[in-house]
Every structure is written in C-alpha cells, then in structure tokens.
Image (cartoon, rainbow, N blue to C red):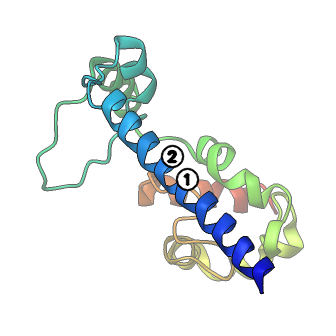
Amino acid sequence: MSQDKQFYSTFFAIMGGLFVLMIVLIIIASNLTSEVTEYAPDDVVIENIKPVGQVNVAGESSPAPAPAAAAAAEPAAAAGPRSGEQVYTASCAACHGTGVAGAPKFGDAAAWAPRAAKGIDGLLASATNGLNAMPPRGTCMDCSDDELKAAIEYMVSNSR
C-alpha cells in the first residue's frame, strides 16, 4: 500500500507542476501577443488575393467593369453573330467531332439522317432544350437561337 501512496503523491506532484507551468506559459503568451498591431497588407498581397471576376445579375446594380474587361467585351459585341462553322468549332466540335455520349459525329450521314428528318426547327428545339446527354444549348450558353440554328445547318449540310 505504501507503494501506491508514493505513486499517487509523485503522480499528483508532477501533474500539479505541469499545471502551474501551463498557467505560466499561458500568461507569458498572452502578454507577448497583446501588443500585436493590426496587419496592413501591402499592394502585392492585395493584387494576389483580389477576385478573378465578378458575377453580374440582370436587374441588379453592379460596379462599373474594369477598363480592361470593358475593352475585352466590346469587340465580341461589335463582331455580330457568329457563323455556323464558328459556333461548331467553338462549342459543338468537342462532342460532335468525336461522338461523345452518343452525339452524332460531324460528317456521319447515317447518324444525321434520322435527325435531319425532324427538320431544322425540330433540331433547334432539341438543341435549345437539351436531349439525352446534351445539356440545354449544348455547351454554348452565349449563343443566340440564330447562331445555334446556323451551327445545326452547318453540321447537317456537311453530313449528307
């Protein structure tokens, strides 16, 4: 029994010493960190953490775009509608060029024949609403209906 008493007294003495040491370290740490001033990042840090872009929602006021962003947007708007070939190359070729997920391949007359039988307006409705694995408007969210129609006509006319 004396061994147990000696163990407990040694154990509690060590634990008490560690507790006192912990309190002393907490007091020292709080004194050292209480004098820290507010961090003011420099211009490099601000440049590195600025947002890449911004989301503009129709009907909500938003800050004026940066001059570079406004200049980049102007040529696209001034260029006018894209041709069917341009839309196909930019948005449709990824799937229709290789036949991904059952998409009819560009130039494959057998695959396009039953689809062409629906007519251009039927194909435009399928492209606008999406069909099977194809999402609505394909991968061209900024295409007008006329541009989609031109792309469909381009694919159908080159698959006969």
Q: Could you classify mark 2 by the number of other residues whose Cα lies within 10 Å: few (under 14), some (14-19), or many (20 or more)?
A: few
| 93 vs 46: above or below | below
The location of residue 34, given as percent across then percent down, is 27, 31
Q: Is residue 116 above or below residue 43?
A: below
CA–CA distance in space, label 1 to label 2: 6 Å
Task: Locate the N terminus and report the quarter of the image it occupies.
Answer: bottom right
Amino acid type of the residue tagged 2 in the rendering: Leu
Q: Residue at x 80, y 73 (%)?
A: 101
Do callouts 1 and 2 mark residues in contact (Cβ within 8 Å)?
yes
Q: Quadrant of residue 126?
A: bottom right
**Which residue appears at 68% of the width and 64% of the height?**
10
Residue pointed to by mark 2: 21
Relative image position of residue 98 (x, y in whole percent): 86, 58
Question: What element does badge 2 sit on?
Answer: helix
**Where 19 falls versus 71 (above or below)?**
below
Left or right of 135: which side holds 81? Answer: left
Image quarter in which the C terminus is found: bottom right
